[in-house]
Structure formats: C-alpha cells, structure tokens
Image (spheres, helix red, strand yellow):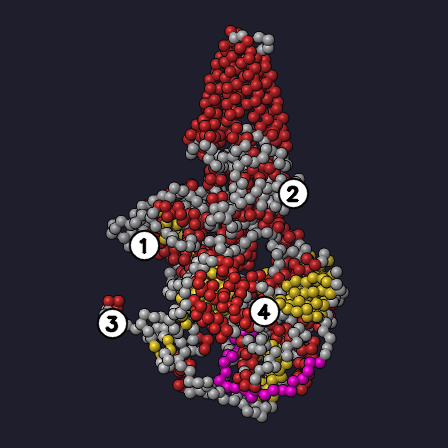
Amino acid sequence: MDFSTQAIPRIDPRRPWVLGPSGLKRIVLGDDSGSRDAALLAHGPAHKPLRSSGPFSQRLLVVAHAERGQLDDAAREAIAAAAILAGKDGEVLALLYGMQDAAPEALAELAVDRALTVADPGYAPEQKLALLQQLLQQESPHTVLFADRGEDADLGRRLACRTRLSVVTDVVEIAADGVRRRQPGAGFSLRERAQLLLLARGVAEAKLPFVGKGERLQTTALSAISEQVQDLGSAASPASELALEEADLIVSAGNGVSNVPGFLALAEALGAAVGASRVAVDDGRFSRDKQVGATGKTVQASAYIALGISGAVQHLQGIKSCRHVIAVNLDAAAPMIKRADLSIIDDCQSFISAFEALVRRERKEKQQ
Amino acid sequence: MSFSLAHALTGLFWLGALLLLGGLARRASLWQQGRSASVSWLGLLAMPKRYFVDIHHVVAREPAVARAHVAAAGGGVAILLLSALNYGLMLYQGWLDVLLVLMAALMLLGARMMQARRLQAPPRLSQGRWQVLPARLRLFALGSLLAAGLLFAGPQLGMAGQLIAVVALLMLALGGAELALGIGLGWPMKHAVAGLLHLAFHPRAERFAAKSSDLKPLNLAAGELGVAKVEDFAWNRLLSFDACVQCGKCEAACPAYAAGQPLNPKKLIQDMVAAQSRGTDPAYAGNPHPGREAAVMVQPGEDIVGSVLAAETLWSCTTCRACVENCPMLIEHVDTVVNLRRHVTLSRGEVPGKGSEALANLRNTDTVGGYPLAVRYHWAIDLDLPLLQPGEQTEWLLLAGEGAFDMRYQRALRALVKVLKAAGVKVAVLGAAERDCGDVARRLGDEAGFQRLAQANIATLAQYRFARIVTPDPHVFHCLANEYPALGGQFEVWHHSKLLEHLLARRAIPLKADATPLPPLTFHDPCYLGRYNDGYHAPRNVLKGIGIKVVEMPRSGRDARCCGWGGGAAFTDIPGQRRIPDMRMDDIRETGTGRVAVACPNCTAMLEGVVGERADVIELAELVAERLA
Amino acid sequence: MKIAVLVAPAVHPVSGRPCAGEADLAALALAQRLSSQVDVWYAGAADDAALADYLARGADNIHSLSLSPGSDVLAALCSVLQGVDMVLCGARAGGGDGSGLLPYQLAEQLGRALLPDVLDLSKSDQQWQALQALPKGVRRTLAAKLPLVASVHARAASAVGWSYARLQQGKIQRKAATGAALPQVVLEPARRARALVAASKVSGHARMQGAIAGGEGKSAGIVVKQGDSVEKAQVVLDYLRQHQLVDF
C-alpha cells in the first residue's frame, strides 16, 4: 500500500505533543512543536523509603566540595557508592564543603545519614587536612570516598600521603573481589579495597531509590593552621580565551549565522566559549582553532548551543560527549535537531539578538 | 677611415669575453659555497641533446615563445660564434660578415617578437630588467647588423659611415653588456650561461634518461639533516637556481599560489638566488608570495627559513610537481622545498598545524591518523579476503593504505576487491602487518620517520611471497615503486588503474551486457599517479573500457590541478584566500557533468570535503563495480 | 636556581608503545623557561628507547635511576632531590600507575609546599606565583616560597616540537638504584566497568513506567516552533537555568 496517497492523514503517535490546559496530551495536526518521547505524567513526587534506620555499627565517609551550593554528578556518585556499599548497619557520613545552607531534606535526598557541612575556605589544604584527621579520629570510618576530580582529588591525595592510609585512585569499579582502576595502556588493574578510594566517573548510579537520615553533625570551626601555600584568589578565564576543549558552555555558529559581531556579543554576554562549524571556518568567519567536529576539535561542554548548524556527521562526532545540546535552526529537519535536547525553530539572527538582550537584562537584575 | 671598425670590434669582442669570464668566475664562487656533488663531466657532452630535446619538450608547449626564442637565442649564439671567428680570431672575412648580417637579422626578428610579447606581458612574467631585455637584445642585433653591413659595404662610405660605425659600436657595447656583465651581476642574461651549465650538471641528471620524480634519501648516519643555510645545498643546486628565467610558468601552475597561500614558486627560487648572492643581484620584480612583502635579505651564516623565506611559504607546497613539470629551465622546485623542510622538521621540530600530530601518530602508531593497525582491514571482514601468512604465496598483494581507515573510501576498497574477485585475480592482504608507507612523513620533511617506516615495510614484505603489489593509493604506489628501491626494496608495484586497465583489455572482468549508455563524467588526475608517474592513460582507458565518456577539464593530465592534499598540505593547512579543493571543484563544475571520477583516497577525501553544492565523487573501482555483470 | 624535572614514559593509548607524557613535557618546557640549570630525572624500569621522546622534545640529558620492575621510586627520587630548589613533574604520568600521587608523596617526604596542576610559574618578590588550572576554565593564583614541588597540568602544553637532531644529540645517563617492592597488581583487559546500582524494591508497574518514560535526563527532544524570538530566547534561558548551566 502506498501511504503517501492515503486520503486520511495518519498521525504518528510518537510525534511531538503539547500538554493541554486539562492536563491531556494533545497532538495538533500540522504542528510539530512540543515534546518528543517525553516523560509520562509524573504522579507527584515519589515517596522514597529510608535506606536504613540503624542502629549503625560501622560507617563510610564521603568528602566532597560543592560548587555554588550544589554537588556535581561525580560527588553524587561518590555518595551513592557509599550508600550502596554501607549495608544495613553501615552509616553514610559526609564532610561537605560549601553546603552549609543545605536543608536536611536535601542531605537526606543525597542519601547522607549524617553530614558535617563546612563553609569552603578556598585553598586551605592544611586546615582541611586537620579537620579531616580530627573527623577520622572521632568517627573512625572504615572507608573514605572522594570523587577523583578537582578539589576532592587533591584533598584525597593529600590525606593519603599525610596519614599513610592505603589508597587506590581512578577507581572505575568496586566489586566483591576488590576494586578496579584504569591502568594506563593495560586495561584494568585489580587491587584490594583500600581505606581511601578516589572514584572515577560512573562507579555508581547516582539515582537512588532511597533516602538517608539527613542529620547534621555539630559544625566545628576550622582550626587556624598556617598554610605553606597562599591563595591569591581565582578567576574564571574569559570565555574568548578559553580553549574549546576546556569550556563548559559553548555557543557555536554555522552557516545560518551571518551577523558575526552579534554572535560574538552573545557569547560574551553568556560567558560562553566560541565554536564554529567547518563551513563557517572555511568561509573565513572564524579562525581554524574554533572549528568543532571530527576534523576540528572534540568538545566536552556541559551545554552546547548550536546556532544555524545543520549538523553534518563530522560535526556531531565532535559534540558526542556534550551533555546538553540546544539547537537553533530554521530547518526543522536538520540532523542537529534530532541530536538536540532542546530545539528552537527560528531565524538565527533575530534569535541571537533577542537572546543576547535577555541574557544581558537578566544578568543585570541578578547583580542588583 | 680614421679608425678601423674591424679592430674596434675585435677589441670589443675580447673585452666582452674577458668580462664574461670574470663574471662567470664570480658567479662560480657563489656556487662554490655549496656542498660538493658527484657530477659527471660527460654532462657537458650531453648538453646539446638536453637543450634541443628536453628543454624543447617544455618550451614547445608555447609555440610563439619557442619560435621567438629560437630566433633570438639562435641568432645571438650564431653572432657570437661568427664574431669570435671573424673578429676574435681576426680573420676579417667578408663572407662571414654576410653571414653575420643574416644572423643579426634573425636575432632582430626574434628580439622584436619578444618585445611584442612584452607589450602585453602576462602577469606571471617578471618586470624590471627582464622587461627591457628584448630592447637591449634588439640593440645588440641592430649593432651587429650595422657593423657587419658596414664592413661588408666597406670603404665606399665616408663621414656618414664613420658616424654609423660609432653608433653601431655603442649599440653593440650596450647590448653586449647584457651578456658580458649579466652572469656576474645577476642580470637576466645570466640564464644563458647558468642555464647551459645547469643542463650539463643537473642535480637530477637521471631525468634526462627516464621519468625521475623520487626524493633522494638523506644519509642520516652521516649527519645529513636537510638544508639550513645556503652552504648546505649542493653546488649544482645553487647553479640550478641561477638558471631561472622568471617566466612564471610555475607561478601560473601552482595551486597554492592560485589559492592565495603565501607561496609563489618563482619567488621561492629567486629567494634562493637572493640567499646565495647575499642580495647583490638586482631586486626581484615579479609577483610576491601572496600576502607577503619582499623578504629581508639573509645575513651570512643565517638560516634560510626564517630570514629570506617564511616557514609558511615552505609549508604551503603540495608537492604536486606542477611547477617542475612546467619549468622550461628544468629546475626542481619540489626537491628544494623538501630539502628545506627536512631541516625545519628534523633539526628544529617545527611542523605547523596538524602536521606535527600526523608525524607523532606515525611514530607512535605507524598510521597517519593514529589508528590501531589491527582495524585497517575491518571493512573487508565479510569479503573473504585472504590474509597472507609468512611463507604463503599469492599473485597479487593488495596494500589498502591509509584510505582503509576512512569510511567513505572503504566503499571504494570494497568495490575494488569485488571487481578483482569477479575477474578471478588471486589477491591477499597483510592485515595488521601493513604500516603506513611513509609518504606523509617524507613530504613533511621527516626523513628519519620515512626511512624507519620504509625499512620496516621492506623487512615485512620480505617475509611474504607475492608476485606483484597492487594499491589504489598513488602515494603508496609512488613510495614503493620509486622511493623504496633507494633503500633496498625492489617490488613490482601497480596502481589499481593499471591493473583494471589490464583486466579490461583482456576481457577478464565480466561486464553487464546491456548497452545503456552511461552518463559522461570528468576525471581528476592524482598528482602522484599523473605527473609523478605519467599514469595518464590507464584510468582513462578503464573509463573507456566500461563505456563512459570522459569530458576533460581544461586543466587535466599533465596540467591537472592538485586536490590540495599532497605534501602533507592538508595537515599543515596554511591559510590562503581560497581552498585548493574548492578551486578544483569549480574546474569540475565547468565540465557540466556533475560527476567526477577519482583514483586516489586523498583526492576523494579532499573533493568530497568541498562544502555546498558539488559534483558526485566516484572512485574508479566503484565505477567498474557498478558495471559488473 | 636549580630545577629538577621528573619525567616518565607514557603508554600510547592506541598502540601501547612508550611515548612522552604531555604533562611531563609541559613540566620540562616550563622548567627550561624558568632556569638554565635544569636536571631531568627518571626513576623506574623503562629502557632508554622509552625516554627517547623527551630527548627529541627538549631534554639534553636525562638521569635515569634504574630500578627493578615493580619497585617504589619514591626513596630513590627523594635522595637525589634533596638539594634542589624546585621540583617539577607532570600532574599525572601517562604510564605506570598514572595515579597522580607522586607529587603529593614527594612534597610530603621532602617536607615542601606543593603547587598542584600549575600552568605557569613566575617569581614575584620572595615568592613564586603559580597559575593553577581548575575545572571549567577557572584559574587560581597560588604563592609559595622555595623550595617547592609543583605538578604541571597537561594543558600547559610544551611548544617544543619533536626533533630528530635533538634525539641524536641527547644523552641518557643510567645509575642503579633500589626501592621497596610495591604490592603486586592483577592486570585485566579493559571492558565496560560495572557501576554500583542500588537494589530497587519498587513495583513492577513503576519500573515499567520508568522504562517507558526514561530518566529525567532522557526526556529530551523538545522542539519549540511557536512564539516570537523573545519567547524562544526565554525558553532557552529557562532550560539553561533548569539544568544549572548558567550562574544567573
């Protein structure tokens, strides 16, 4: 049967739908905006059970630094690993820097049973070590877990060298027969489970079906200890100077972007690094080091905003590991739209100016 | 007569001869800065053949200029010889004067033709002294004509005759100075002397016997690391630069120049001249390297790259040999470019763009793209392609090359294997034992990397028994066929176009019987098959054999434009005004066929990489496979 | 000022051949920029060929402390680094364990300040200032006095290219050394690592729903067609805020 000549238009049940005022899914003919393959209606917040009510006979400690009051996925995975490893009589203890404002429910949701929340003093390894050693003495956890990235990785290594506790870094798998770490050039190496574990990404599934008790330890003041190294302050490098490989937020221009100054102004307002498709680079609108894709650079941004990029295979290869892809394009059939998590069907020029104005306005309001 | 015109001519002749010899000695001292080179003095005997045959082959492509040059140069040489006899040796024979008058008239005609051409000089020609040279030659010819005529006509003329004699002598002196002083002062007529000596002591003398396009290996053990300074060139290489006539045929043929990349091959050779003469020659008056000012002059002892020559100029070259193929003075530009690159790469380690990454990949993985060797033949996993074991025997050994890692080109490779199987050809592969041939390493100046890969490949191939090697990659073909022999690897290597031509000629490939006419297409010659190996006919015969008409591009065959990949140019990626493959796609578009046949994995990648509307790019083997019964 | 640079061969991720580690190369280049008295040290069981890349990329002379395979290099290194003002090494070796512990162990053993993940070092007054690379492009300035240990971030990237001439001229001087035996490890081929997953006690219905709907991260593929550019811009900003991708 030839479907294209059918009299009655058929409706693809998987096509995007919108939620009507009555709460019903509606598929409007001739309109393909809305969600595709979207989540079914949530039946209100699910009530998760408590992991274990105790009493606890042993405990694990997780140490993590928060950024802007939020733990990132790596830190959440470390806590999840602790909660899964803890068992019925095991307690999940956490030392959290920069989460002093977190509500007990938030801590419980993280599956933490008891937490010591301390304001982040910045670069102060000696102070942090002192507090950690004090905590180790008080609570004597059998395992201490860190996410193996950033400040946590640094503190974990310092603790291992200071206390001479056994340590395994870059742990990719915690199994019954020991822990596995990635060995350069040799696959995995299997080791005995050490007292300190520095965890690579993906060791544990961060989504947990239970909650912790979410209690708080009495906050102890950091003891004043002199540091060998002085912190002279930190700054985010300007987006324009940021290497694409390092950038967390990238706006990228393709053939559809004709107003380059306007585009660059948006990048600056957003604090995003600038990328470009091969077409835009070949045209001379951008320098070669801005090119994203198989022949250019492979990027790992959390968010990648593709403006007027249709999305050739080579380009999509370069953004494979970007977490959130947002596409703005006039052509709703472009491959980039299929890859994107959020797609805006719009003219790039007018979108860029509208978006830039919005970002500048919101930033200003935030500052006031 | 109050003075004897004949004796004056004798004096003038010997004065000129002395000046010429002095100038030659000075120039020779510049050439002596270079390293010694093993040259055969027999080259002097071979000079006439090289002049009248080899140079003529190139010059005759522009018949009007060739005729003008024959008249001017032939006349000029004859005048010099006759003058040497008649005045130099003081024979003072009337009949020689008649001959002189005739030759002078011939030269006058030639110089006139030259001058006419200079009125509408194509932009590739240098200006400056070159622009006024025809006029000077005319003076010389006219002077000869008058003087010889006067002497023949003899004593009948009175005062007027004396006046004409003085004018004639002045003309001869002015015009003759071009030649007498030219060699010493680097004026245009330098090319006559240096050019003839260059023919005799050509650094690539084997090119006069047969096609010769291989790069010569460096003796790394002896510490040879390419050319840093003028002194590192062989003396006859320095001589070859002085042969340049600045005709700009290389400039007109160069794809990098056309793309606005900072390379003008003519200027590059003149940069070498400036380097060896320490800037004492007259200023260069031709087109510069695009986007560049005239370079600063070298100080004694200073490296060439970075002083007289910018590194970007060196890295813009695609080693396509279009310049060499078009040079009427048989100068070898590519050898010079690679010799200079060798120093920059081997000694300084400064390879721009992704070039250094490609070389690192070759060192670390034996592939240009950094792929595991084990995946090279993954595309053939379902094709039942036998893996050759040491000691086993096969008729044909297929080397897929780097294209085997490219998903697009794997289609072409599969098509080739299908065709060979259909034709009943016994073919096997090396699998993970195949390394890169070293082409990219060598052209990027990494001679050490090339020799390592070549020696490893030669040792590997020695373990297997096969009659011939076939490869679809012209770069692999060129390396193995022409460059491995110098390192001890003697193999019979065929490009797949030749094998397909051979099989079609023997009707070994079962083709579809139906005679539906196929749409015509155009063919893009790969440089390393065409200009490097004269493989112009085989691919065209293959297309003809499967019933496809080829619509030739204006730049095809020997004049084909490079795709922009060669010489590692795709890796060094020096920016210009346009991209070379885009220009080539324009050539293809002009044929109106909408399809182009290619015979090289790199041309395939470059032409398919053209963005926007473009012609379909189809590999030769794919076209044959489509016609399989 | 005397600087010691520690280098070690990395394992090439594709071919498994020894090559230079990017971070170690960056440390070497930084040291050569800071001082003319640079000693390059290696401790371990690798042969000379494995260190060739370092010669080709700028080291004139490498002191190689030869240890038997599987022994701890810490003691041997500490004994030769006592009198050195500044010790530079890559933040992580691309070979061996590649655990990134060595700079910490050295700083602890030698009792020195540690500047981790530096991109650049410069002197101001009596102190050395280090530009430290933090994730997401954040740069922090740290200051410490000599003697110190600094681990150099791979992003500092050496600008010195690979040169055959330097490789030929460079020398490796071997010296025997001893170290404590490290615990044996069992090597396994790489595979997909199994993540820890909490045992779930939810109903079959809930699990089914979860499978259909996917996680909250998978509810993607929203296409917005309606509205003007301003409204669409608001949608994008809302999305960025919802996923904490912007800080305003």
In the figure, residue B61 lies in which quadrant?
Answer: top left
The amino acid beneath tag 4 is: Pro
**Chain letter of the residue beneath label 3 in the structure image:** A
Confirm whether the magenta stretch covers residue A198.
Answer: yes
Residue A31 in percent (x, y) is at: 34, 70
Q: Gap between marks 4 and 2, in whole Å?
A: 45 Å
Residue under label 4, please give it: C135
Front position among marks 4 and 3:
3
Residue under label 2, please give it: B302
The amino acid beneath tag 3 is: Ile
Q: Which of the image's four quarters has the C terminus of chain A?
A: bottom right
Front position among marks 2 and 1:
2
Dot 3 lies on which element? loop
The amino acid beneath tag 1 is: Glu
Front position among marks 2 and 3:
3
Dot 1 lies on which element? helix
Q: Is residue C55 left or right of residue B517?
A: right
Residues indicated by labels 2 and 1 sit on the same polypeptide chain? yes
Q: Residues within 10 Å of mark 3 (few under 14, many from 20)?
A: few
Residue lying at the far bottom of the rendered structure? A55
Q: Gap between marks 2 and 3, in whole Å?
A: 82 Å
Magenta stretch, overall SS: loop
Pointers 2 and 3 in contact (C-beta within 8 Å): no
Q: Residues within 10 Å of mark 1 (few under 14, many from 20)?
A: few
Pointers 2 and 1 in contact (C-beta within 8 Å): no
Pointers 4 and 3 in contact (C-beta within 8 Å): no
- Disc marking residue B626: 1
Residue at image x 24%, y 71%?
A8
Instruction: Examine the rendered structure and indicate whether residue A199 appears above or below residue B67.
Output: below
Residue toward you, A43 or B153: A43
| Residue range corresponding to the magenta coloring | A197-223
